[in-house]
C-alpha cells in the first residue's frame, strides 16, 4: 500500500471509530465524506472529469469481474 493510501486509511479508520462512538453509521459518514471530497475536487477539476472518475469506479466495483484495462 502506498504512503498516500496508508495515510488515507489511517484517517478513515479514525473517523469511522469516532463516528461509531457517537452513534453515527459508517454509511452516513461515508456519504458525508464523499460529498466533502467531491467539493474539494471541484476546486481544481471539472464536474465532468469528476463524474467520469466516479463512473469508472462504479463500473468496476465487482471484485469478481476481469478487466482488460486498469486505470493507473
Image (cartoon, rainbow, N blue to C red):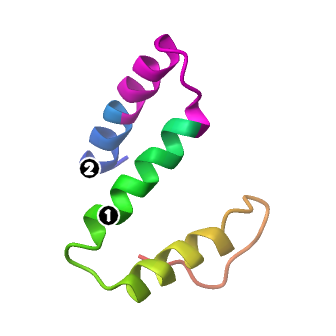
Q: What secondary structure characterizes most of the magenta part?
A: helix
- Compared to 68, does 40 lie above or below? above
Q: Where residue 42 appears, x then y in whole percent?
A: 28, 73
Residue 34 sits in which quadrant? bottom left
Q: Could you classify mark 2 by the number of other residues whose Cα lies within 10 Å: few (under 14), some (14-19), or many (20 or more)?
A: few
Q: Where residue 56 appears, x then y in whole percent?
A: 57, 77
For the point 72% across and 58% down, which residue is it? 63
Q: Is residue 16 left or right of residue 45?
A: right
For the point 46% across and 22% down, which residue is it? 19
Q: Are marks 1 and 2 in contact (CB under 8 Å)?
A: no
Q: Where residue 45 appears, x then y in whole percent?
A: 27, 80
- Compared to 1, does 56 lie above or below? below
Q: Nearer the viewer, residue 12 or 62?
A: 12
Q: CA distance from mark 1 to mark 2?
A: 20 Å
Q: In the displayed orientation, state which residue is furthest to the left.
A: 44
Q: What residue would you read off at disc 2?
A: 4
Q: Is residue 24 magenta?
A: yes
The label on residue 28 is none
Residue 70 sits in which quadrant? bottom right
Q: Secondary structure at mark 2?
A: helix
Q: Secondary structure at mark 1?
A: helix
- Compared to 4, does 52 lie above or below? below
The residue range painted magenta reads: 12-27
Q: What residue would you read off at disc 1?
A: 39
Q: Where residue 12 appears, x then y in whole percent?
A: 39, 35
For the point 41% across and 47% down, which residue is it? 33
Lower sequence index among marks 1 and 2: 2
Q: Which tag is nearer the camera, tag 1 or tag 2?
A: 1
Amino acid at each position: 500500500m502506498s504512503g498516500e493510501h496508508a495515510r488515507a486509511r489511517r484517517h478513515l479508520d479514525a473517523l469511522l471509530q469516532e463516528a461509531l462512538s457517537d452513534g453515527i453509521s459508517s454509511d452516513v459518514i461515508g456519504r458525508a465524506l464523499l460529498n466533502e471530497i467531491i467539493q474539494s475536487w471541484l476546486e481544481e477539476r471539472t464536474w465532468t472529469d469528476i463524474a467520469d472518475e466516479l463512473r469508472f469506479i462504479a463500473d468496476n466495483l465487482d471484485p469478481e469481474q476481469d478487466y482488460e484495462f486498469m486505470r493507473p
